[in-house]
Amino acid sequence: MTNIAVFASGTGSNAVNIVKSFNGGSRIRVALCLTDKEDAPVVQKMKDMCIETQYFPRSVWRENPDVILETLRSHDISLIALAGFLCFVDDRIVTAYEGRILNIHPSLLPAYGGKGMHGKKVHQAVIEAGEPKSGATVHVVTDTIDMGPIVMQKEVPVLPGDTAESLEARVHEAEYELYPNAIAKVVKSIGKNAEVSGEEAQDAVNAEPPAVPRSVDDAWAEALGVSNNVPPVPQSAPQPAPQYSQQYSQQPQPGGYQQFGYQPWPPTGSPAPAGARQSALQTAEPMPPTWLVWSIVITILCCFIPGLVAIIYSSKVSSKYFAGDIEGAKRSSRNAEIWIIISFVLGVVSNTLYIPLSIAGLF
Ligand code: GAR
């Protein structure tokens, strides 16, 4: 299991998406969220998802990054994902996690990046410049703002009449797809706890992206061309409410930070809350698309065609009967019965055999 930390200062929709993409699986999990904004919406969202969240004031981020590093090490963090984190990341942290800090930026870097460019300001600048397209970029954090090696990018169009808000919403959707893939790619490349050099980080960036593992239902949804939006974790999920209030009431810790509630996800020893995304996300294999094609072909051959023949014979029964051809009506009736039985038997046999044969790889 590779532990990752998310740094966030704002709404936290990317942080939530990263947690939903990985936690509950067996390879990667968000073990920690750090923030420089005590009352940022992301704090409550992480708490709702039972992710340990710690607040450090900017003075600590700037003057005492060793406290941050110690916290990261004590949680065995291998990779850091900045998700709307608006505080400066000290060089000592960048050096300690060289090649293992990622950032997401809401434009096609290197365009519209750099100091002061974040969130809506970026989208406003893109619209004002009349750009036909924008997008999102995940890059490795280095000592130069928004200039580290690019891990992945995803384009979106800028549409006529777009406002900063509408473009932001479109870019956000791209980010939700992009960031988990980029994290999976870098984690796979660097390996757990690997101390990587800048060169190795660049290799990781150049490597082929592994697809984020999908659940069976995601794979089905993709094959059928429908959406598989899992509802967010319900607020009514069993949560250690007393623990939270207890921990919230804690005095700030030495070093000037305050620790928020923590409980592993799903809470140890208790079942995952109903409706919550389950661990299949990372372990299930995608369904091969050929299965769907074969199952449609077999259903047509074995069930639909014999069924159609049976219907044709059935319709002949009454027409022959009323034409006075009693023998013919009997024959058609018998044929209809036979084809109904054939359709039933073929349907059952083909579907029963098809599943093990497909699993054995014969289809
Ligand atoms: C994201 O769009 C991210 O790309 C951007 O802040 C937003 C955070 O949204 N980051 C930057 O602009 C960094 N320069 P979120 O809090 O909903 O994830």
Image (cartoon, grey):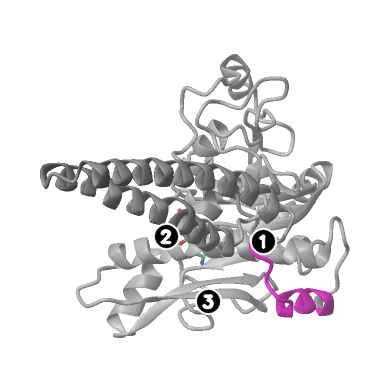
Question: Please, what is the three-letter code of the amino acid marked with disc 2?
Answer: Gly
Label 1, on which residue?
183
Residue shown at 67% from the left, 69% from the top: 141
Apparent side of residue 283 relative to residue 351 in the rendered image (left or right): right
Q: Position of residue 322 (x, y in %)?
A: 11, 43
Which amino acid, mark 3?
Answer: Gly
Q: What span is in magenta? A: 199-211
Q: Is mark 2 within 8 Å of ligand 1?
A: no
Q: How many angstroms separate mark 1 from mark 2 (CA)? A: 25 Å
Give me the C-alpha separation between circle 3 and circle 1.
22 Å
Whether residue 197 is visible, yes or no, is yes
Q: Which residue is mark 2?
A: 225
Camera-side mark, 1 or 2? 2
N-terminal label among 1 and 2: 1
In the image, taking residue 29 as reference, residue 341 lies left or right, namely: left
* Marked residue nearer the N-terminal end (3 or 2): 3
**Amino acid, disc 1:** Ile
